[in-house]
Amino acid sequence: QSVLTQPPSVSAAPGQKVTISCSGSSSNIGNNYVSWYQQLPGTAPKLLMYENNKRPSGIPDRFSGSKSGTSATLGITGLQTGDEADYYCGTWDSSLSAGVFGGGTKVTVL
Amino acid sequence: QVQLVDSGGGVVQPGRSLRLSCEASGFTFNSYGMHWVRQAPGKGLEWVAVIWYDGSNKYYADSVKGRFTISRDNSKNTLYLQMNSLRAEDTAVYYCARDRGSSGWYGFTDWGQGTLVTVSS
């Protein structure tokens, strides 16, 4: 079991919106920055969001991030077939003195 | 452009050792924290270890503590992971990743291509 909890899968039709939740605790999400990663099949992960809600250059504004208390959320609007991938949240856990990832969420475009 | 090249993976027997390397280029290596992240076949990402920009601090996942050692040679722009007492459950693709910051966790901007470690008799 991962320290951070994500839904195993979410799905929506092209053009629609999906949100992916990431639930943790005060020792991780509650007091540290959250980042999000997209992993396409057979490739290395790619940074989508850092410091909770900041997009690296080149990431379209269809992707958004937010954090409230001990939970974080990644939103994807205008869903495209190219968005089909696994998505992971991650952060530092101050109690463990270790990094932690969520279990990952598979996004399917119907 | 930024490049991280992972190497050193292979097939190793349980209880043996292996050293992974990550050669960095295209950025000021000695200014950034570096991480190792692994992914077992068909599974999710697992954070393994981090080393601060100057090597002054290192942290490990409980699953590898006491067996793995992260290090860096800033003169060679290279990150290492020494893995001892390997177990079957260490079988995974190992990625090195560059943090946005010099220490801690600020998001991993760049990733190596990964190197596969298989622990099997």
Image (cartoon, grey):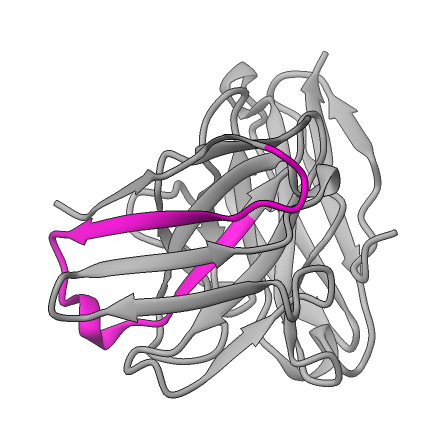
Q: Residue at x 44, y 85 (%)?
A: B57
Residue A23: image quadrant is bottom right
Range drawn in magenta: B13-37
Q: Residue at x 54, y 20 (%)?
A: A41
- Between B29 and B108, the residue placed more toward the observer is B29
- Between A82 and A13, the residue placed more toward the observer is A82
Q: Where residue A73 sits: x, y (%)?
A: 70, 56
Q: Is residue B85 placed above or below A96 in the rendered structure?
A: above
In the picture, measured across the screen, residue B118 lies left or right of residue B101, that is right
Q: Where residue B50 sits: x, y (%)?
A: 48, 69
Q: Where residue A34 sits: x, y (%)?
A: 59, 66
Q: Residue at x 76, y 45 (%)?
A: A103
Q: Where residue A61 sits: x, y (%)?
A: 43, 45
Residue B84: image quadrant is bottom right
Q: Residue at x 64, y 73 (%)?
A: A98
The answer to whether residue A1 shows anywhere in this view is yes
Q: Quadrant of the C terminus of chain B?
A: top right
In the picture, measured across the screen, residue A57 lies left or right of residue B47, that is left
Q: Is residue A48 placed above or below B68 in the rendered structure?
A: above
The answer to whether residue B106 shows anywhere in this view is no
